[in-house]
Image: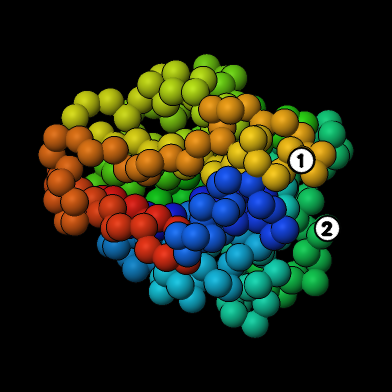
Amino acid sequence: MRVTLLGTGDTTGTPTVGCDCATCEAARERGVSRSRFSVHVENERTGESLLVDFSPDFRHQFLEADVALPDAGLVTHIHFDHLDGLGNVYRLVDGLPVHAPSETDPATDESVAETIRRKYDYLEDRIGVHSRDPFEPFETCGFEVRFVPVDHPPLLCYGTVVEDPQTGAKLSLTGDTSYDVPERSREVLADPDLLLATPSSPRRSVSTTRSAGARGTRRRSAHVRHETHDPRGGARARGRPRRRPDAARPPRALLPRRRGVRGAARGRRRGVRAVNPTLRPRRDRTVLSR
């Protein structure tokens, strides 16, 4: 299983257009750009690829990362930065299965799957939308996949678990969430080979990470925290909402160094491959795992 983080930015990306906060200024000075969220999961056994969420930066991400177009997709929730790149598949793929939760959201009176069908009705000859019940496993791209409810109000939002039944590899993505992940969801997310956490509240999310558990020296976790804007800079001066100070600091490392994981193609366990390349200008970080 090869996992590539195509985008790890927030809704507006980093740097944000017209923003002169400390974070955005530092990003410009360093020539660094973080695009909106999307994760590419390749099944190296079958040669198929699964895309978790469709970033508005879809085209740029696939050109920059040089990864294969997806054979199937997952949508965790209907926020712009996770869904609105779906229109990019027009003329690129044919018959793309898109899997989405079936639970009706009280805020919209639709499930995620129903919203996709309505919003992208013009793609009906290009994609097939499949409704999936939370916690119920389904197969796609040679993986066993489940959606699990998390906490990202006001809309329903889901994390995902992707497992390879042949190798036993397990990837857990919390999805956009606060600390209040339901206990049943924590149990399903628990004990992965790679945990990707995208917390709304970075410090409290540490407890979520521990309970979801990339446990042991050979298990790995990464906080895919959005590089939010500095409340002490220009963003606040323009009347934008005050941010928590702890949310303003960008993450120093996406993949923590652990014993048995020493860089490219090391840290092998039952076929594990882990790579954490250096953050390059204009690119998001990439993680490759088993």
Is residue 185 shown left or right of residue 165?
A: right
For residue 213, say whether it is visible. Answer: yes
Label 2 residue SS = helix
Q: Count of labels shown?
A: 2
Asked whether 284 or 178 is in front, the reply is 284
- Expressed as whole percent of the image width and height from the top left, the position of residue 134 reads 60, 34
The residue labelled by disc 2 is 118
Disc 1 vs disc 2: which is toward the camera?
1
Residue at 54% x, 60% y is 28
Above or below, comparing residue 230 to residue 118 in the picture: above
Q: Nearer the viewer, residue 290 or 209?
A: 209
Characterize the local packing of mark 1: few (<14), some (14-19) or many (20 or more) Cα atoms within 10 angstroms: few
What's the image's color scheme? rainbow
Classify mark 1: helix, strand or loop: helix
For the residue marked with disc 1, what is the amino acid? Ala
Q: N-terminal of the two: label 1 or label 2?
A: 2
Q: Indicate the quadrant where residue 241 lies.
A: top right
For the residue pair 206 and 109, the one nearer the viewer reads as 206
Q: Which residue is mark 1?
A: 237
In the rendered structure, the answer to whether residue 222 lies left or right of residue 264 reads: right
x and y, in percent, of residue 164 in the image: 33, 48
User: Is 28 placed above or below 160 here?
Assistant: below
As drawn, is 166 to the left or to the right of 115?
A: left
Please give the name of the residue rendered at 55% of the width and 43% of the height, measured from the top-left corner: 226
Residue type at numbered disc 2 = Arg
194 left or right, relative to 178: left
